[in-house]
Amino acid sequence: MDLETVKLSQIVERLAPELSPFLTEREMDISIVLRDGLALLEPADAMEIVQHSICNQQREALLQ
């Protein structure tokens, strides 16, 4: 198992570029740790990561 840390922007650019206009700069800059690295990531995985990242950003904004 190889852990790899990437920015959400790398995941979006590679697997879901159509989502790019809907994400803020702050969201695109989130660091994501991938258990098996970017090479093995599937488009469905990318969508799930984006969804969770947006939810976490919104939750943090509400707590502030």
Image: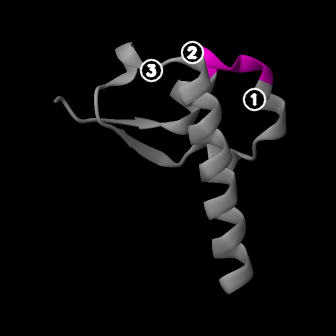
Disc 3 to disc 2: CB gap under 8 Å: yes
Is 63 above or below relative to 20?
Answer: below
Q: Residue furthest right?
A: 21
Q: Residue furthest left?
A: 1
- Frontmost of labels 3 and 2 is 3
Q: Residue furthest bottom?
A: 64
Q: Amino acid at mark 2?
A: Arg
Residue 11: x, y in percent? 54, 26
Q: How many marks?
A: 3
Q: Quadrant of the N terminus?
A: top left
Which sits earlier in the primary sequence, circle 1 or circle 2? 2
Which sits earlier in the primary sequence, circle 3 or circle 1? 1
Which of the 4 image quarters holds residue 50?
top right
Category of crowding for the residue at label 1, using alpha-carbon neighbours closer than 10 angstroms: few (below 14), some (14–19), many (at least 20) = few
Q: Which residue is mark 2?
A: 14
Q: Amino acid at mark 3?
A: Leu
Q: Which residue is mark 1?
A: 20
Which of the 4 image quarters holds residue 5?
top left
Residue 42: x, y in percent? 51, 17
